[in-house]
Image: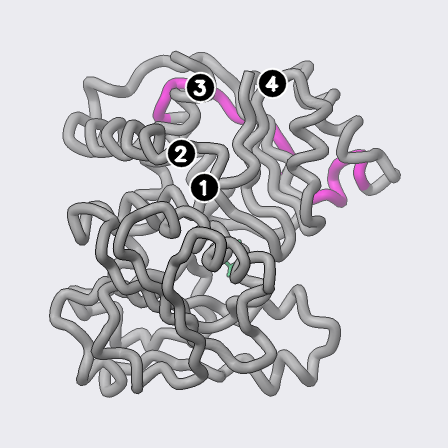
Amino acid sequence: MRSIINILDLTVEELDELIATANDIIANPKSTAKNAGVETGYPVFEPSTRTRLSFEAAMYELGGNVLGFSEAQSSSAAKGESVADTAKTVSCYADIIAMRHPKEGAPLVAAMNATVPVINAGDGGHNHPTQTLADLLTIYREKGGFENLTVGLCGDLKFGRTVHSLIDAMSRYAGVKFVLISPEELKVPSYVKQGMKDKGIPYVQTTDLESVMPELDILYMTRVQRERFFNEEDYLRLKDSYILTPEKLTNAKQDLAILHPLPRVNEIAVAIDADPRACYFKQVLNGKYMRMALILKLLEV
Ligand code: NCD
């Protein structure tokens, strides 16, 4: 039995395997619809649209079922039940658990107490490995691989958990460079920076998106994470730090891939959606295929 709490819990070879499975599902939608016959416990302790729906869609498409609750208020967590006890309980009913939680480390605690695999569906401002699976499949399908890419990450790099997991994942490929674009207050945390330093990955930090635009192969935009701020004034001051408009893409590469984990607030003008470089809705769909591939792997079906 194996849980996925961090994207680094999967080796590069396993990521290749998941990408191959997902590509196979995309190419042969009917023939690969296996009956997994499983149930996903889905305790969601903070809001979710894509992650929840894509896990559910993935389970149903595999022939499984889903049970769970969409908010902590409707579970015994509201009565004070611990994450450990919730995990033990859901293990009695489900074959695999996907858990989203506002506290960093909660899915790890769940994994230590569950008797079925636990997938971290986003823990606080820490990690979000399955969003990274969606990101990786999107990059793979757009670029044909991961090596020698210059990856710009823009917005809330401090609290954006998808950013932390994507940096970890991409740091394992040769020739990758990161351009970290954020306000001073929202720079990547030092533990994420240390990870890049340890692996000798080149990165630059800047506050100016337009000046670095011509270098980028990937531009990963993110939302300023309002729910993680300690005060509303700081959020209001920083929320519109970056708004990607068609004019700002003037000097961008013709084959740039623009990603965003979504939800978008106003970091990307709607006018960009029609640009062939906009990949964020493909990314949503890719998330479902990668979650199908991951569930198949963890359940060994
Ligand atoms: C992201 C998250 O929850 O961290 N959303 C998602 O799962 N696709 C990004 C965000 O909320 O900004």
Give the magenta part as a residue range. Answer: 61-77
Residue that numbered label 2 is attached to: 291
Name the quarter where the N terminus is drawn: top right
The disc, 4 or 2, on the residue closer to the chain's N-terminal end is 4
Q: Amino acid at mark 4?
A: Val
Q: CA distance from mark 4 to mark 3?
A: 15 Å
Q: Amino acid at mark 3?
A: Gly
Rendering coords of residue 9 (x, y %): 49, 33
Camera-side mark, 3 or 2:
2
Name the quarter where the C terminus is drawn: top left
Residue at x-position 68% and y-position 14%: 92
Residue 286 image-quadrant placement: top left
* In magenta segment, residue 74: yes
Residue that numbered label 3 is attached to: 64
Rendering coords of residue 196 (x, y %): 46, 57
- Label 4 beta carbon less than 8 Å to ligand 1: no
Report the disc number at residue 130: 1
Residue at x-position 19% and y-position 69%: 274
Residue 192 image-quadrant placement: bottom right
Residue at x-position 68% and y-position 49%: 104
Is 80 in front, or is 63?
80
The disc, 2 or 1, on the residue closer to the chain's N-terminal end is 1
Q: Secondary structure at mark 2?
A: helix
Q: Amino acid at mark 1?
A: Thr
Q: Is residue 284 visible?
A: no
Report the disc number at residue 116: 4
Residue at x-position 34% and y-position 68%: 152
Q: Is residue 300 visible?
A: yes
Camera-side mark, 4 or 3:
4
Q: Give the side of residue 134 with respect to residue 224, left or right.
A: left
Q: CA distance from mark 3 to mark 2?
A: 13 Å
Q: Residues within 10 Å of mark 4 (few under 14, many from 20)?
A: many
